[in-house]
Image (cartoon, rainbow, N blue to C red):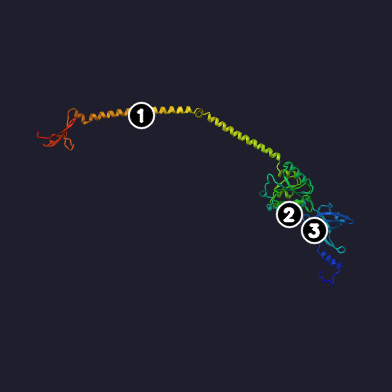
Amino acid sequence: MSAKTSPEAPLPIRSVLQMVAQWIGKLGTVWVEGQITELTARGGTVFLTLRDPVANVSARITCARGVYEASVPRPVDGARVVMHVKPDFWVNKGSFAFTALEIRPVGIGELLARLERLRQVLAGEGLFNVDRKRRLPFLPGTVGLICGRDSAAERDVLENSRRRWPAVRFKVEQVAVQGSYAVGEVTEALRKLDADREVDVIIIARGGGSLEDLLPFSDESLVRAVAACRTPVVSAIGHEQDSPLLDLVADVRASTPTDAAKKVVPDVGEQLTLVHQLRDRGRRVLRGWVEREMSWLESVRSRPSLADPVRELDRRAEQVDALRERSRRCLSASLDRSADSLEHLRARLVALSPAATLERGYAIAQRPSGEVVRLAEDVKPGDELTIRFSDDRVTVTAQDA
């Protein structure tokens, strides 16, 4: 291909194709993996197409019948295989293909081992953690459904959902649910429904199948797309015993498409029954409370203080009268005792009073200053004295004795 060419000096196409064949022949051999489709045998040669299990990429492969028959078990359409191939370029037709030197079927054990390794990696990143899973809405307005074209899974979900709640709405995205196109179509439908603000929950549903049929739902890119969704996702893949990685990353796992309908859409009959039960329970609770309050009120009304209020007033009035009479008696006795004590004090005062002595004929001599004259020798001639009698007093002047 390094030869210099020009419009005046072009190379023959055979020369170009020969150079391409020589360059491709230097690439050597390589081990590849894929899924067999379009398998045909003509004479001693077997022709097939090897598709990538994830991307929409395929390549033509030829092999000798002996190489094909040497593989045990013999590959069939849809089988996952590993091939040892070398690239070939057919100069006569200008076509490219691989020639298979050896074919090895990919066993179930190897597929399971790969899935387990992928599961551990995704689990280590936290994609399967319970705390990141979201709760489903009680009554979704619109349910997004991703399912196969005209599939039984679609009918199961729609019929059971509408039987439970007839007003529920669906947006259905029909996609390939197995084969090389499944991952891309399911992922694209998931992103479309997740971007729709009317969709409250997304169901990914598929009926049962073999491990190879369910492999698209364990694809890493699909699992990560589900983990990145803002809308809750329900996985309803296969039957109870099937467990693709999609079940682990989804917010809710349903064992079957029918079970998914039951988990996403509430039963209107069950909800009405629940409403009736709650209403009856509320009525019983309220009636019990009213009856307890009425019983309490009746017991209060039956108490003597409320049954005959006047009687209590009479009793209190009697107590007031008794206390008033008692206080009157106490006060009278106290006054009597005080009067007696006062009489005794007066008698003592009368007995000790100078007036009583004066009444018996005695007199008291006092100087004008009020000083009492006790001895005659204290009086000098000419001293003026006041003589006090019991009824009056007189003023006298002392003379010589």
- Which of these two is toward me, 132 or 195? 195
Residue type highlighted by circle 2: Ser
Residue 117 seen in render: no
Q: Which mark is residue 31?
A: 3
Q: 10 Å neighbourhood of mark 3: few (<14), some, or many (≥20)?
A: few
In the drawing, does residue 153 fall left or right of residue 124?
A: right
- Label 1 vs 3, first from the N-terminus: 3
Above or below: residue 326 compared with residue 127:
above
Residue mark closest to the camera, 1 vs 3: 1
Do labels 2 and 1 touch, CB within 8 Å?
A: no
Residue 302 image position (x, y, % from top left): 53, 28
Q: Which residue is mark 1?
A: 331
Residue 154 image position (x, y, % from top left): 77, 46
- Label 2 vs 3, first from the N-terminus: 3
Residue type highlighted by circle 3: Trp
Q: Which residue is mark 2?
A: 221
Q: Secondary structure at mark 3?
A: strand
